[in-house]
Structure formats: C-alpha cells, structure tokens
Image (cartoon, rainbow, N blue to C red):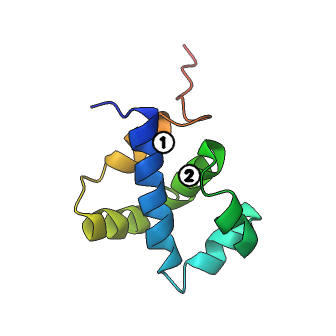
Amino acid sequence: MQYSADAAETLALRALSWLLGQDDLLPVFLGASGASEQDLRTRAEEPEFLGSVLDFLMMDDAWVIQFCQAEAIPYEHPMLARAALPGGAQMHWT
C-alpha cells in the first residue's frame, strides 16, 4: 500500500491529535522537536511539520502501537504515511 500526500497528511494530523491527548508524551515531543505550543497551532498544516510528528511517533514502538490501536489502523501505516511526506523517502545506499 502506498499513501497519497493528502492521505499521509490526514494520518499525521490524526497522530498530532493523538499526541495532544498524551499529557506525558506531549512535552517530550516539544522538547525533542524544538516546537512550541504555538507551533502546534500555526504549523499543523505544513507537510514538513507533520513529517516531524510521524518521525517522533516512530521513535518508539510502544508509541506506534498505542497510536495505531487508538486509531484502529495497522502498525505499518505511520511508516507508509511518513514516506509520502517531504523528507520521508528511504535512502538506498546500494
């Protein structure tokens, strides 16, 4: 399965919404990304920012599992969505 850019942005917005509901995890995202609470409001429509949300989510399998279970989606969907956003292409070194 391959995500379109629009579908990837929608999934990333769902991930951002889920992240906003995680009181213990949201400060970790803000610290790791350097984003402010204002950035969450003003940059939520930027594909690059949404990519950073998925990058953060995929840093920990437990977070991916929690998000995917909450959204009732397969575990590989955040990775597939990330690949469709700017900077998400996988590097092939061979």
Q: Tell me residue 62's x, y (percent).
A: 39, 68
Q: Secondary structure at mark 1?
A: helix
| Amino acid at dot 2 | Asp
SS at mark 2 in the image? helix
Label 1, label 2: how far apart the Cα atoms are: 7 Å
Asked if one can make out residue 36 in the rendered structure from this viewpoint, the answer is no
- Judging depth in this view, the residue of 41 and 67 nearest the camera is 41
Q: Residues within 10 Å of mark 2 (few under 14, many from 20)?
A: some
Q: Which residue in the protein does label 2 denote?
A: 55
Q: Is residue 76 left or right of residue 17?
A: left
On screen, 27 above or below 90?
below
How many marks are shown on the rendered structure? 2
Quarter of the figure with the C terminus: top right
In what quadrant of the picture does the N terminus appear? top left
83 vs 65, nearest the viewer: 83
Q: Residue at x 60, y 34 (%)?
A: 86
Residues tagged 1 and 2 counted as in contact (Cβ below 8 A): yes
Is residue 68 depicted above or below 79 in this figure?
below
Q: Which residue is mark 1?
A: 82
81 displayed left or right of 39: left
